Amino acid sequence: MMKLTRFVLSRSGSKSTPMKSRTRWFSTYSPNPNGYGSSSSVLYADYTIFKGKAALSISPILPTFAKTLSGALKVDKKGSILLKFSPAIGERKYDYEKKQCFALSATELGSLISLAPAKSCEFFHDPSMKTSNAGQVRKSLSVSPLSEDGYFFTLTVVNSLLKTNERFTVPVTKAEFTVMQTSFSFMLPYIMGWHQLSSQSSGSNLAKRTDVSLSPNLEWDR
């Protein structure tokens, strides 16, 4: 069973940085030759794991590119793999309005792809790190062994401003984790933007795609 979610979104609300060479935003998305994924389409592609206390949805976020005055294209914002945890409110019912997100970087994906059986890893995110607001919102993602049959994915979110402490735990079977690892390996070059390097027509496709760009609902939206 799979739940679908947002993959390509509008970037109208994003902030621009003062780079004199920047002129316009582009995404890596291009129309599908079979008629699907036209310029006005939004793509949905989640892998969702439904469990008794929470659901875990996983979706890729592509990078955005900036075009310089010289005509060169460079990655402006790297992509990620977004993990979304939603609490259960009944049998096979989940409150997606109260979801919490955790965006995995390329290096963090590498830790999960190479995670050996019976081993664990943990990641910490602080959006205000190295500022006076550091520590106001803290997120930690823990991946720990579930006997020999999989892993526990546990997300803890501590918000000192709202005085909340949320915790989501989703047991992931060995088969589900294998799907995750395989998907992570496949998407890694895409979230880094490297797939465009091997595309003969990537430059022209990006130049034509001035109407679609990415601004995903990343983990710090709430």
Image (cartoon, rainbow, N blue to C red):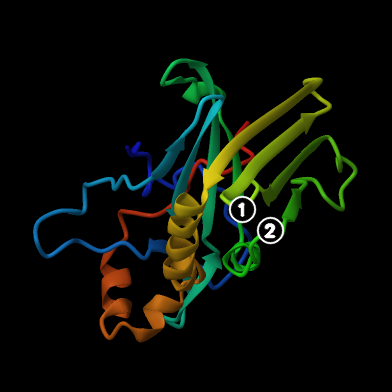
Q: Position of residue 177 (x, y in %)?
A: 51, 54
Residue at horizontal 64 percent and vertical 31 percent from the top: 168
Q: Secondary structure at mark 2?
A: loop
Q: Which residue in the structure is indicated by mark 2?
A: 118
Q: Which residue in the structure is indicated by mark 1?
A: 148
- Name which of mark 2 and mark 1 comes first in the sequence: 2
Q: Is residue 58 visible?
A: yes
Which quadrant of the figure has residue 32? bottom left
What's the amino acid at mark 1? Glu
Q: Nearer the viewer, residue 153 or 161?
A: 153
Q: Residues within 10 Å of mark 2 (few under 14, many from 20)?
A: few
Q: Residues within 10 Å of mark 1 (few under 14, many from 20)?
A: few
Q: Nearer the viewer, residue 43 or 104?
A: 104
Q: Position of residue 92 (x, y in %)?
A: 41, 21
Q: Nearer the viewer, residue 134 or 145?
A: 145
Q: Are marks 2 and 1 in contact (CB under 8 Å)?
A: yes
Q: Secondary structure at mark 1?
A: loop
Q: Give me the C-alpha separation between circle 2 and circle 1.
A: 7 Å
